[in-house]
Image (tube, rainbow, N blue to C red):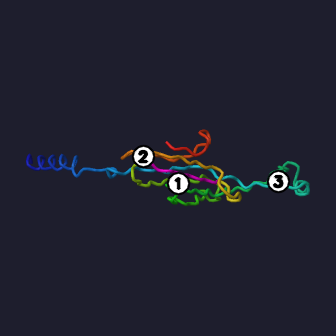
Amino acid sequence: QIFFYGAFIAFVGYFSSNPRYQHLAPDKALLKISLAHFGDRECRKRSPEELAKLPPNMRNPMDCPRGRSAIRLEVDLDGVPLVQHTLKPTGLSGDGISTMYRRVELPAGEHKLAVRMNDNEREPGFKYVKEETVKLQPGQVLVVDYNPDHGGLFFQ
């Protein structure tokens, strides 16, 4: 019985430190794109004729459907497209939050990072744009996130 306990302890002891786990290659850095955002609602203003046809308690001047717009996201690294994705809203009625999580390994060093996001499909172009030159150290993790309290898109 002592032999089997010893073999088990040796097995666990060996595999607790071997084989060595390497998170990233020595010359790589990591870019994490983590977004959770509600797309805009596509509201329209009702005409006076439409309002007159409605019962008095339902005369809201704006008509907003339940569903939300998809979010379009583009990420470029050194002028080369890295991510181009459309985030669909969740939920049965398409009225939930749009989320994305993606990890991309990059070579360490200085890079020009550009992130563009639009949360309304009807509007052309991009509502939120963030461009910055970043210097990534080997093993560094750079997070791209969106928070309206921080001014929109930000790098951390």
Residue drawn at 70 percent across, 55 percent down: 66
Query: Which residue occupies the foreground of this view, 156 or 34?
Result: 156
Q: Nearer the viewer, residue 130 or 52?
A: 130
- Please give left or right for residue 156 compared with residue 49 in the image: left
How many residues crowd mark 3 within 10 Å: few (<14), some (14–19), many (20+)?
few
Q: Decide whether residue 115 is among the magenta residues.
A: yes
Examine the rendered structure and indicate whether residue 69 appears above or below residue 156. below
Q: Sequence order check: which comes first, mark 1 or mark 3?
A: 3
Rendered image: mark on residue 136? 2
Residue that carries the numbered disc 3 in the rendered image: 45
Residue 14 point in image, percent of width and height: 18, 48
State left or right for residue 76 relative to residue 96: left
Please tell me whether residue 17 is drawn above or below residue 90 in the rendered image.
above
Circle 1/circle 3 CB separation < 8 Å: no
The mark closer to the camera, 1 or 2, is 2
Q: Picture coordinates of residue 155 (x, y %)?
A: 51, 44
Q: Is residue 69 magenta?
A: no
Badge 1 amino acid: Met
The residue positioned 58% from the left and 48% from the top of the image is 130
Tell me how far mark 1 sits from mark 3, CA to CA.
32 Å
Label 1 crowding class (10 Å Cα cut-off): few <14, some 14-19, many 20+?
Answer: some
In the rendered structure, find residue 152 and report the number of the disc placed on it: none
Amino acid identity at mark 2 = Leu
Q: In the image, what residue type sits under mark 3?
A: Lys
Tell me where the magenta segment starts and ends, as one range. Answer: 110-118
Q: Determine whether the residue tagged by mark 3 lies in a helix, strand or loop.
A: strand
Q: CA distance from mark 2 to mark 3?
A: 48 Å
Query: Horizontal and vertical percent for residue 137?
Result: 39, 45
Q: Is residue 58 left or right of residue 138?
A: right
Please name whichever residue, 130 or 111, is drawn nearer the observer in this view of the structure.
Answer: 111
Judged by depth in the image, the label closer to the viewer, 2 or 3, is 2
